[in-house]
Image: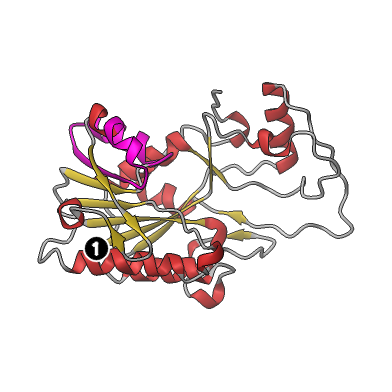
Amino acid sequence: MNINTISILGCGWLGFPLAEALLDKGHVVKGSTTSPEKLPIFWKRGIKPYALRFSPEPEGDDLLDFLDTDALIIDIPPKAGQQGDQFHPQQIQAVADALQQTGAKRPYTIYVSSTSIYPDLNREVVEEDVITPEQSISPAFVEAEQIILALGNSTVLRFGGLLGYNRLPGRYVAGKQGLTTGSIPVNYIHRDDGVRIIEAFLTQPQPGQTFNVVAPEHPTREAIYRRNCEAFGYETPTFAEPAEPAPFKMVSSAKLIKTLGYSFQYADPLAFYYAL
C-alpha cells in the first residue's frame, strides 16, 4: 500500500503534532478543523487546511477533495450531551457516506476510538472483550467503530487517556479531599507514543483489525496524582479508603506490541514527559 497523501479529520491536540511528524517524513498532509482561526496556522506549517464540521451532516467546502487521499485519520471527539448518544455514530456514518462518493479509490482509514468502551470487569481487558454494542458501556462508540470497519480497508485504535505536555493529571485533582479511586490502575498513553503508533500503522496497515493503544504499565491513580502534583507544585489531594473496592479495568496493549513489534517511548505513565 503506497501512502503519500494523508488527511487528518480533526487536526487538534493529537492530530496537529501527527501532521507535523508526517510532514517531516515527506508526506502531503491535509488537516481539518472546526476553528477558522486555525487555518492560517495550518498553512504556515505546510498543512493544507480545510474548515469542516459534521453536525452530524458535513458542513464546509471541499469535503470530497479532503477525502481524495491515500489514508484518512478520523479523530473527532464523540461529543454527545444535548445532541444525544447517537450523534457521534451519525457523524461517522456521514463520513462513511462521503467516502462512498469518492469512487473506486478508498483511502486506508484509521479511526481513533477510546478504551472508555470497556466496562469495569475487575481484570485485564483485551480487544475481544468488546465486539458488539451490547458488550460495551459506551455502545454508541462501538456502533461508530462498526461503521468504519464495514468500509473494509480500515483499522480501529482504542486510545487510553491521552496525556503529556500541557495535559497534566495532577491539575484536575489538585487540592481535592477524600478521593476514593486512588487504588484504580490507570490506562494512559503519552501523546508522543500516540503519534508514533499511528505512524506505525500507516507503515504497516492492519485492515479489519482493532487495537488498544495504552502504555503497558498501569500504576495507580494515587501514584500518578502524587507524582504529578509534587513535580508541578499543585496541592496534593487526599485519599480515603472506599467502603467497597472500586471497580476497575486494566487495558492490555499486548496485541499492538506483538503485531507491530512496537517499543513504547513512555511505557510507564509515572515517567511521562510534561511541559507547562
The reply, left or right, for residue 160 in relation to residue 107 is right
**Residue 161 is one of the magenta-drawn residues:** no
Q: Residue at x 82, y 58 (%)?
A: 245
- Residue under label 1, please give it: 153
Q: Position of residue 200 (x, y in %)?
A: 32, 43
The residues colored magenta run: 12-41
Q: Residue 107: image x %, image y %?
A: 19, 57
Is residue 35 positioned above or below 192 on the image? below
- Percent position of residue 193, x then y: 44, 37
- Give the residue furthest to the bottom: 134
Q: Secondary structure at mark 1?
A: loop
Question: Is residue 63 found left or right of 17 in the rendered image?
Answer: left
Q: Which image quarter holds the C terminus?
A: top right
**Figure coloring:** secondary structure
Q: Is residue 172 visible?
A: yes
Q: Residue at x 48, y 75 (%)?
A: 132
Residue drawn at (69%, 57%) of the image: 248
Q: Amino acid at mark 1?
A: Asn
Establish if 104 lies above or below 198: below
Q: How many marks?
A: 1
Pick whichever, 102 or 245, lies toward us.
102
Can residue 24 be seen here?
Answer: no
Q: Residues within 10 Å of mark 1 (few under 14, many from 20)?
A: some
Q: Residue 196: image x %, image y %?
A: 37, 38
Name the one closer to the observer, 243 or 204.
243
